[in-house]
Amino acid sequence: MREYLLTLCVTVAVTYLLTGPVRKFAIAAGAMPEIRARDVHREPTPRLGGIAMFGGLCAGLLVADQLRNLNGVFELSNEPRALLSGAALIWLIGVLDDKFEIDALIKLGAQMIAAGVMVMQGLTMLWIPVPGIGTVALTQWQGNLLTVALVVITINAVNFVDGLDGLAAGMVCIAAAAFFLYSYRIWFGYGIEAAAPATLFAAILMGMCLGFLPHNMHPARIFMGDSGSMLIGLVLAAAAISITGQVDPDTMALFAGGERKATQAMLPVFIPLLLPLTIIAIPVADLVLAIVRRTWKGQSPFAADRGHLHHRLLELGHSHSRAVLIMYFWSGLIAFGAVAYSVHSASMWIVLAIVALSALGLVLLLLPRFTPRAPRWAEALVPPRYRHRERAAEAAVQDATGREPESARPVRVGVSGVNGATAVGPRSRFPDRRKAESTR
C-alpha cells in the first residue's frame, strides 16, 4: 500500500506542476477555441491539459517500475506497456484535435486503433464470468471485439460528460478510487497477482485527475480537452479489462455451494464491468433525454442545444460549483455503493444506506426550488437571501417605485448572462462610471 501511495503522490505532483507550463504553451499555440452558444464559460480558455496528464501517467509508471514490490507487475505482465502504447496514440490524436479540430470519424478510427494496439500486446478479454455457469472462454475474435467496444464506449462516455469545469476529472477520480479499493481487495485479499496491474492503473488514474483538478475547478484556468478526456477514458477502460478479462474467477473459489450462493458470490466479479457505467450512466441518460426532447420538438436528434443535464442544473438555480458537486455525489453513490454491495451483498443495511443517500440526492437536486427562512434570532448568521427583512425591504421598494426590485428579477442563463456560474446576477448593475463622470 505504501508503494501505491507513493506512486499516487508522484503522479499528482507531476501532473499538477506540469499543468501551469502547459497552459502557457496552449495560449502561445493558440489552442483556445471560440465560445459556442451551448458553452457555459464566458471567456476563451486554453485546452491541451491532457499533455500534463500524460506526463503524470508516464511519471507514475516510471516510479512504479523502480519500486521493489510493484516492479513485479512489469516483469510478470506486459499490460503496463500495452497501456502506455495505447495511451500515447490516443493522447497524440487528442492533442491534434485540441489544436486543429479533427473530424469525428477520424477520432473514432484512432480510438479503435489505440484499442487494437493494446489488444496486440495482450491487454484483452479472455473470458467472461457468468453466474451459475462459471467462466465462459472467449475466442480470440470475440475477446478482441469486446475489448475494442469497451474501450471506445468508455472513451466517448468520459468525453461526453466533460461539459462543466472539473466535472469529468472529478467523476473519473471517484470511479478510479472505488476501482482501486475493489482491485486492491482482490489482489491483497485473495492473493491474486493478476489483479495488481488494474490496481496500479487505478492509482495512477487517481493521481492524474487529482493533480489536474486544482487547475480545472471553476473558474477553470485550463481545460483537459480531448487529449485529456480520451486519455483518462482509455486508462479507466484498461483497468476494467485487466481485472475482468485477465483474473480467473475460479481462483477465488466463487462457485462453491448452491446456485444461489454462487450467484451472490459472483457479484464482485462483475463490479469492474459496472464501475465504468458510473461514468456512462449519466451521459447515456442525458443522451436519451436529448433525443426524446429534440424529436418531440421536431428537431434533429443531433442538433446542439442547452438542454443537457448540467444545463438543467444551472437553470434550476444551482451555481456552477454546486451542479458539479451534485454530479460528484451521484457518481460516488453509484461507484462506492456497488463496491460496498459486492463486499456484503447480503447486508440489508447497505441497501438502506443507498436508498437514504439517493433520497438525499433528490433533495439536493430540488434545493433551489425551496427558499428556507432562518428564525429572526439567527438572521445575523445567515446570508441575506435567507432573512425575512430582505423580503420585506424588497416589497417596500416595489410598492414605492411600482417596479420589481432588480435583485428579485430572474437571472437569464446563457452566454450573455451569468452562464450559471454564479447566482450573484449580471456582471454589473451600475452604470458605467466613466460615462457618468465624463463631460464629453
Image (spheres, helix red, strand yellow):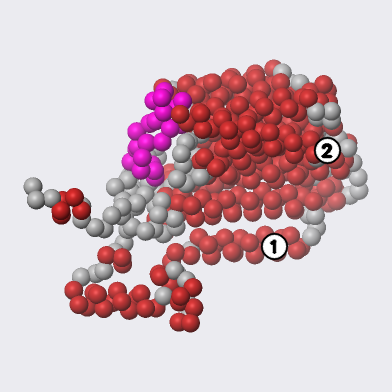
Residue occupied by mark 2: 187
Secondary structure beneath disc 1? helix
Image position, residue 207 (x, y; %): 65, 37
The answer to which of marks 1 and 2 sits earlier in the sequence is 2
Give the residue at the far left of this rendering.
440
Q: Position of residue 186 (x, y in %)?
A: 82, 40
**Horizontal side of residue 367 vs 81, given as left or right:** left
The quadrant the N terminus occupies is top right
- SS majority, magenta: loop
Question: Residue 264, how many percent across, how many down?
Answer: 81, 50
Specify the amino acid type for callout 2. Answer: Trp
On the picture, is 299 further left or further right than 14? Answer: left
In the image, is residue 308 above or below residue 61? below
Residue type at numbered disc 1: Ala
Residue stretch in magenta: 25-47
Mark 1 sits on what residue? 353
Membership of 170 in magenta stretch: no
Count all numbered tags in the image, as a single digit: 2
